Image (cartoon, rainbow, N blue to C red):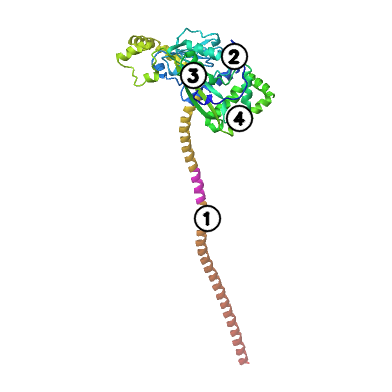
Amino acid sequence: MGNRISKIKPKFFYHKSKQHEKLKSYLPDDDREINRHHVHHFLKRFLFQNNFSSPIEQKLMRTQCKVLDVACGAGTWLLDCSINYPKSNFVGLDINPLYPKEIKPDNLQFVQADILEGLPFPDNEFDFVHQETMILSYTPDQWNYAISEMVRVTKPGGWIELVEPYSFAIGAGPLFVEFYATAYNTFLSRGRDLRMIQQIKSLLESNLNQNNVRIDEKTFILGSNGDKIGEAYLDYIFKDSNNSELIIKSISHHMGISSEEYLKVVDDIIEEVNQSRVEYLFYRFYVQKNGGNDVEEENESEGYNEGDNEEDDEEDDEGDDEGDDEGDDEGRNAGENEDEEGDNEVNEVVNEVVNEVLNEEVNKEVNEEVNKKVNEKLNKEVYENVNDEVNEEVNEKVNEEGNEEVDEKVNEEMGEEVNEEVNEEVNEKVNEKVNENIEMKNDENNERENEEDNEEGSEKTL
């Protein structure tokens, strides 16, 4: 196939599948399955950075293209596309009515039918036919029949696109390899061949009798080493897809373990993957059906302007672009004006529902921007608050330290003054005491002298 999937050939047994078996899925038909569809759609859109690889976007934007999504599931891909390309008409087909039945865009409708009983549409009906992740649903013979039906209903010059993962991860550890070998044999025993991705290109070419199938390959690291998409897809594989009751029962039976032991094995595999660098591959196979104007839309879109000259309009008429002539434009515009008021009402409801459906992706982008702004504001406020608190603490600390220094200084100065006063007072007291003692001594001396004088006078008298 000219790419890696043709070089990877696991050595597992193979047997002829049953024929004309009714289409079945090994995944549950409930709210979990609807959520699984939503998650898977956004993972693939994030990985490829668009909803399809076929170069048909310009045609979807400017003309009334008819688009069919086979096995549409919950209709997430269709809801996304029908909102983005309101001029085109979209049809979803699935055997299980998981899709929204009431509230949806005016340019989207759903049909409950089994592709294995034939697509309920005439030949050459659609400009674009799309199908995703049916590797667990078709047997090899059913793959061939389904592709032949998609080729039949595609217009000459229209595009067919099939999207599938390559189930055998590259660089996986022993637990992962053993698990997938068991899963491969489990599904193969029920007629589903996980290696059928290697045959899709040749099946398209043989049914179209063409050899111009293109492949858009995307690779990412599975698990925590692969950033957000790696972590999310690891959860999708082992916690969403592989946790249906039927899958657990089937694989655990082939492994010879209980359901509880199976879940423990899954936890061990997740841990193993997160400690390694496991490559996971996704492929889009797309091809333009011969027989139309054989001019690819990506070439037509270069230099395209809605006011092109008359020669371009004539070429578009010959090339099966019915909506590009002047009369059709006027009629379509008139119809659009008449329905505009009603469409606006429905679109409000649709947008509300679609926003709810698509909130995982849309809110993620919006929330990142909002959170950035909020965080900037919060950081500013927190920074200011912290600064205020820090300044208060610093000021308090400074005041405490300053007061201690001031007290010391004051005490020193006051001590000097007090000492001077005390010394003066002490000296004064000492001087007073000394003076008192001197006076007392003088008094005693005077008394003694007086007594001596009196004695001398008495003696003379006698």
Q: Which residue is the site of mark 3?
A: 354
Q: Is residue 461 magenta?
A: no
**Quick one: 310 or 102, which is closer to the camera?**
310
Question: Badges 2 and 1: C-beta atoms under 8 Å apart?
Answer: no
Q: Residue at x 55, y 24 (%)?
A: 166
Q: Nearer the viewer, mark 1 or mark 3?
A: 3
Question: Badges 3 and 2: C-beta atoms under 8 Å apart?
Answer: no
**N-term mark: 3 or 2:** 2
Q: Nearer the viewer, mark 1 or mark 4?
A: 4
Question: Badges 2 and 4: C-beta atoms under 8 Å apart?
Answer: no
Q: Identify the amino acid type marked 3.
A: Val
**N-term mark: 3 or 4:** 4
Q: Identify the amino acid type marked 1.
A: Glu
Spot occupied by residue 422 in the image (x, y as percentages of width and height): 54, 66
Q: Residue at x 58, y 77 (%)?
A: 440
For residue 138, side relative to residue 306 (left or right): right
Q: Residue at x 55, y 8 (%)?
A: 117
Q: Residues within 10 Å of mark 1 (few under 14, many from 20)?
A: few
Spot occupied by residue 142 in the image (x, y as percentages of width and height): 56, 13
- Secondary element at image label 4: helix
Q: Which residue is the site of mark 2?
A: 24
C-alpha span from label 2 to label 4: 28 Å
Magenta stretch, main secondary structure, is helix
C-alpha span from label 1 to label 4: 63 Å
Q: Which residue is the site of mark 4?
A: 270
Question: Badges 1 and 3: C-beta atoms under 8 Å apart?
Answer: no
Q: Which residue is the site of mark 1?
A: 404
**Which picture quadrant has residue 450?**
bottom right
**N-term mark: 2 or 1:** 2
